[in-house]
Image (cartoon, rainbow, N blue to C red):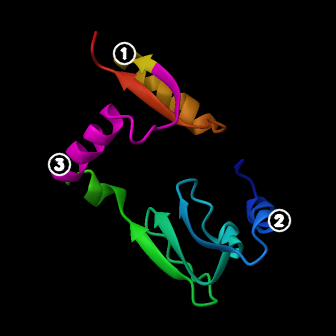
Amino acid sequence: MRRGDDVADRIRELHPEGVDGVADGALLNERIAPAVRDGGGMVVLRGWDGDPGRGIKVHKVLVILSAKDTAALDWLRQQAEAKAVTPRVARVLPAEQAAEAHRLLEAGGIRGRLVLDFSS
């Protein structure tokens, strides 16, 4: 579903009672909370400290800790190779264009991940 400030309203149109939970990879935080049913759950990135209320449990995923978990990263690699998960890739750039990747991220509007290719 497309992101945006009205995403919770659009989700509630499809699921009037709210969804059981959301994994908020877009850092919508308090803007996505209204889509979750009372007592549901939210997985949030980067340590959001907000309180969505209504008994919604917030599960924090701190990317910096996951980046050091080589066993989990290897498992994720295996899942991607087996096509069990398919990451959304916006663009692949050669490693020499890392500065351009940063400029694109700072400009915003990227849907998916920018990938740097170090193979050449």
> Per the image, is 71 magenta?
yes
**Left or right: 61 as drawn, with respect to 5:** left
Check disc 2 and report the residue beneath it: 13
**Is label 1 in a helix, a strand or a loop?**
helix
Residue 117 percent location from the top left of the image: 35, 20
Q: What amino acid does circle 3 point to?
A: Thr
Q: Residues within 10 Å of mark 2 (few under 14, many from 20)?
A: few
Residue 5 percent location from the top left of the image: 76, 59
**Left or right: 21 as drawn, with respect to 31:** left
Check disc 3 and report the residue beneath it: 70
Check disc 1 and report the residue beneath it: 96
Q: Which residues are magenta?
A: 70-92
Residue drawn at x 70%, y 71% as measured from the top left: 35
**Left or right: 113 as drawn, with respect to 38:** left
Closer to the chain start, of discs 2 and 1, is 2
Closer to the chain start, of discs 2 and 3, is 2
Q: Image quarter for residue 15?
A: bottom right
**Is label 2 in a helix, a strand or a loop?**
helix
Separation of marks 2 and 3 at Cα, in angstroms: 40 Å
User: Measured along the vertical axis of the image, is residue 110 above or below residue 66?
Assistant: above
